[in-house]
Image: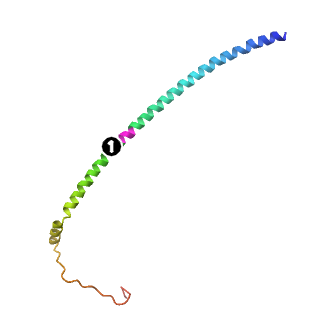
Amino acid sequence: MQNTLAVNYFVFSSRPLILGRKLNLKIICLLSFVLIWTLFILYIFQINSIIQNNYLIKNYEKESNLLSEETKNLEIKFAQINTLENIESLIKDLSYEKIEKISYIQLIGSQVVTK
């Protein structure tokens, strides 16, 4: 009698395992599907971020090139403005005179200002 119970127990105990395996297989498939879609969506966001960063880098490079060209132009203009001829004409326009004799102030003692 115990053998019969054991066989019947074995038959009944194997069926839940089959149902459990089918259920586990469905859960695994569902989780795999969700994982694949999640990774795909993350991939799309990463590609979008990379494209955005590349666009910003190209814009910054263009801006940097424009600024370097402007700097070169300003240096050229500065060199043209500060020539000796331009400085001499500026001195004449401001009515500066040529210094003939230089005289220095001599201090008496160690104090510069007294009361």
What is the quadrant of the C terminus in the image? bottom left
- Residue lying farthest to the bottom in this orientation: 108
Q: At 20% across and 83% down in the image, what residue appears?
A: 101
Q: At 21% across and 58% down in the image, what residue appears?
A: 77
Please identify the quarter of the rendering in which residue 6 is found. Answer: top right
- The amino acid marked with disc number 1 is Asn
Residue 115 lies left or right of residue 67; in this view the side is: right
Q: How is the image coloured?
A: rainbow
Residue 90 lies left or right of residue 15; in this view the side is: left
Above or below 56: residue 8: above
Residue 87 position in % (x across, y down): 18, 68
Residue 10 lies left or right of residue 97; in this view the side is: right
The local secondary structure at tag 1 comes to: helix
Residue 22 position in % (x across, y down): 63, 17
Residue 86 position in % (x across, y down): 16, 66
Q: At 81% across and 11% down in the image, what residue appears?
A: 5
Q: At 15% across and 68% down in the image, what residue appears?
A: 89
Above or below 112: residue 87: above
Residue 25 position in % (x across, y down): 60, 19
The kind of secondary structure the magenta stretch mainly shows is helix
Above or below 2: residue 45: below
Q: Which residues are magenta?
A: 52-56
Q: Which residue is mark 1?
A: 59
Please identify the quarter of the rendering in which residue 8 is found. Answer: top right
Asked if residue 55 is among those painted magenta in the image, a careful observer would answer: yes
